[in-house]
């Protein structure tokens, strides 16, 4: 796969699936079109799909079901629903089950679809950035817990009632194996 964000377009009508993919012409995106929701799910599992654009009315699996499944498999994939008949029940199910980012009415304007997909790619980037930051924080918490288990009060020194630091007597053999690289790793 190239470095371009991957956008998967799903519609049971091959002409519409291709039209959705063509809407990304001129964009720095990698469109993939299919008429099969199962194939789209395989792509989502195999690749970091930025955006899923799906029709609502499909015989095998409707767009809400597909969006909900994609949300479970890869939460950072932004889901967009294309539909010719949007009623309140469909909208609520899309939001509550599939956490759909945007709706696109059929028939659609190609420029509008391209704009919505660009917005979806930006949302994907923001979600990926948040996930990376969360992983960084969790990694630091795990490292801190490991250090605290080995050397109590190392990352959060104990203090006396007057604010003075309490430094416990620690046998020097407890520091064996702790090198400069280990200390510097704590700062990352």
Image (cartoon, grey):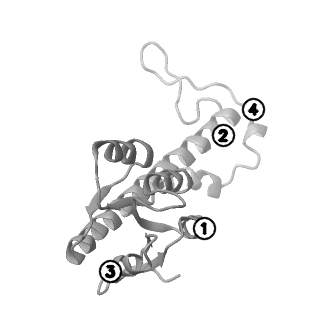
Task: Give the structural element (helix, strand or loop) at label 2.
Answer: helix
For image coordinates 63% across by 56% down, the residue present is 180
Position of residue 79 relative to residue 5, above or below, is above
Mark before the other along the chain sequence, 3 or 2: 3
Describe the element under mark 4 as helix, strand or loop: loop
- Label 1 belongs to which residue? 42
Splitting the image into 4 quarters, where does residue 27 fall? bottom left
- Mark in front: 2 vs 4: 2
Characterize the local packing of mark 3: few (<14), some (14-19) or many (20 or more) Cα atoms within 10 angstroms.
Answer: many
Q: Which of marks 1 and 4 is nearer the N terminus?
A: 1
Q: Nearer the viewer, residue 38 or 133?
A: 38
Instruction: Quote the CA–CA distance across marks 3 and 1.
Output: 21 Å
Per the image, the residue denoted by label 4 is 171
Residue 77 appears left or right of 143: left
**Front position among marks 4 and 3:** 3
Residue at mark 3: 24
Q: Is residue 3 above or below residue 108?
A: below
Mark 1: which secondary structure?
A: helix
Seen from the viewer's position, the closer of residues 186 and 17 is: 17
The answer for how far apart the CA atoms under marks 3 and 2 are is 48 Å
Query: How would you rate the neighbour count of disc 4 (Cα within 10 Å): few for under 14, some for 14-19, many for 20 or more?
Result: few
Instruction: Report the Cα–Cα distance between label 2 and label 1.
Output: 38 Å
Is residue 84 found left or right of 143 in the rendered image? left
- The residue where tag 2 is placed is 146
- Does residue 57 appear to the left or right of 88 in the view shown? right
């Amino acid at each position: 796969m190239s470095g371009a964000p991957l956008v998967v377009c799903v519609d049971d009508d091959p002409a519409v699936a291709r039209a959705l993919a063509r809407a990304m012409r001129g964009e720095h995106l990698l469109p993939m079109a299919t008429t099969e929701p199962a194939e789209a799910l395989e792509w989502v599992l195999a690749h970091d799909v930025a955006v899923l654009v799906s029709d609502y009315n499909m015989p095998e699996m409707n767009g809400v079901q597909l969006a909900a499944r994609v949300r479970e498999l890869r939460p950072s994939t932004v889901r967009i629903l294309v539909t010719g008949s949007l009623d309140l029940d469909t909208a609520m199910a899309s939001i509550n089950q599939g956490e759909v980012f945007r709706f696109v009415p059929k028939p659609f304007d190609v420029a509008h679809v391209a704009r919505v997909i660009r917005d979806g790619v930006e949302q994907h980037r923001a979600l990926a950035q948040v996930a990376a930051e969360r992983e960084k924080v969790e990694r630091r918490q795990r490292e801190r817990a490991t250090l605290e288990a080995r050397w109590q009060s190392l990352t959060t020194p104990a203090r006396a009632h007057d604010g003075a630091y309490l430094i416990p007597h620690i046998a020097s053999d407890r520091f064996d194996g702790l090198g400069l690289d280990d200390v510097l790793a704590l700062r990352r």
